[in-house]
Image: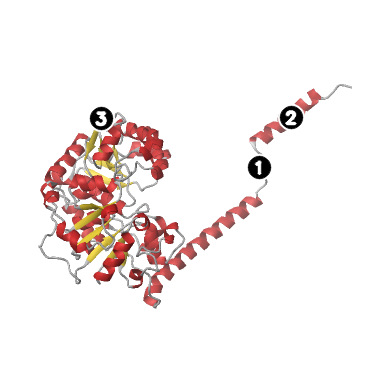
Amino acid sequence: MASNVNDVKRILLRSGKSPYDVVPVERALQEDVFATNSGNLIFSDATHKILETPRAKVVSNGITTRVADADRINSEYDVFVIPLANAFRPSFERQLERLTQLISKLKIPVVVPGVGAQTGVNYSADRLKPMQPTVYAFVSAVLDHSASIGVRGEFTERYLRDMGFRDVDVIGCPSMFLGGSRLVVREDGRSLGPESRIAVNGSHDAVRKHKLGQIIDRTHARYPHLRFIGQNLSDARQLHWRDLSHQNAAVTDIPTHPDHPMYGEGKVRVYIDPVTWMDDLRGFDFSFGSRIHGNIAALLAGTPATVLCGDSRTLELCRYFDIPHRMLSKVPADLDPADLHAAADFGPLMRGHQERFDRFVNFLDKNGLENTFTHGDGGAAFDKQMSGLTFPPGVRPWIGSDPATMAPRLNWLQSQLTELTAENAQLKRKLLKNASLPAQRSTYQRARSVVGRPIKRALRPSR
């Protein structure tokens, strides 16, 4: 285990990037700094802020899992923290296997705050049965390195307890504790009207399989100031580059597609950084849609929000935090967000927040982690450093052809071309140098030349 310098604990955090990293849009989209979904950065940034104290230094590890890094992690860090979302799902199984391999080689504590299982709103675990051995191995490895594992809600808790695990704590998602025990949602009593600023969010599946596309279109017709906020990497690339190479481009009814009218009207965004995301949402009157972290971003900004739940990962978080929600399958296609806004009650969410925060802190204490709200400055230093940085604004649709719109993209492409040309020239020089060297025989070839002739002579028929 790494030795602490001046008793400062070094925490390695699985996250796409540090919240302090200001990454230009083009590079962010090329490197996929938010692991295909910008919602991931909301809970990883929150975890970073929560764990950063005068006695703890938090370092981002990136998303890629390298089992070969185990020795380095053991020598350089005191604890590995892995905030996860809906990791117990078939499409994440390979990543879960690699994480298990890495954790099994670690000698330091490993803490998982807020992992979830994904299935339908009926909470049936049948679709997860094929990957149960993978989940069991992962949770076992985590519990070999920690006192308990934190899960997002009731379904994931039951799912793990049915496997025989007992050290399971329901703590929700770290994102909701970005402000510690304080959470205030604006409730001014005013109804939504045509001049209201409304944010809507949703996945491609929700548009394709449910009626969310129709809901968005009808809301767009009623509310001129509607804005759609996408979260996928493919969404951002469609906005910035008009890149239609991803399979999501087949869904033309989502506003991030260039064929959608909201795209042409510039009423679509994708945010690279949670700070700009929440800053923008503070100016809205209401948010709704099927994205859990899209609506959590609104709530953290103080903006009322209602989630349209289409699976267990959104439903169990809404139930745990008392976030206003409706079942996506049961809302009408002509749903008016004004009705959602009028029916939403944020009292239980705000009244129960202190108790849920205390439960989260107890989980951290149990696993040997301090937090800035109890052991630090309440995140003041974090907020001050963030306020001194200038992050790129939300990614907008590419709808202009003027030089001001084209120049940044063309400049970046030119820089990439220059870098690739230099790398290509360097590789060519290496190839030419290697080609000019005399061929080196392999160990096998050299050994064969030494023993081959005697063996051949011994096997040659005598005359």
Report the number of discs: 3
Q: Secondary structure at mark 2?
A: helix
Residue 460 % position (x, y): 82, 25
Identified by mark 1, the residue type is: Gln
Question: Is 269 on the left or on the right of 352, as rendered?
Answer: right
Identified by mark 2, the residue type is: Gly
Q: CA distance from mark 1 to mark 2?
A: 19 Å
Question: Is 37 on the left or on the right of 410, as rendered?
Answer: left
N-terminal-most mark, 1 or 2: 1
For label 3, the residue is 166
Q: Nearer the viewer, mark 1 or mark 2?
A: 2
Mark 1: few/some/many CA within 10 Å (<14, 14-19, 20+): few
Task: Work out whether residue 436 or residue 311 is closer to the camera in this orientation and state it.
Answer: 311
Residue 84 % position (x, y): 31, 44
Q: Give the quarter of the image for residue 253.
A: bottom left
Q: Give the quarter of the image for residue 1.
A: top left
Q: CA distance from mark 3 to mark 2?
A: 64 Å
Residue 440: give its label: 1
N-terminal-most mark, 1 or 3: 3
57, above or below 148, in the image: below
**Does residue 359 appear anywhere in the picture?**
yes
Q: Residue at x 41, y 61 (%)?
A: 251
Q: Secondary structure at mark 3?
A: loop
Task: Work out whether residue 339 or residue 420 is closer to the camera in this orientation and state it.
Answer: 339
Task: Work out whether residue 100 or residue 391 is closer to the camera in this orientation and state it.
Answer: 100
Residue 452: give its label: 2
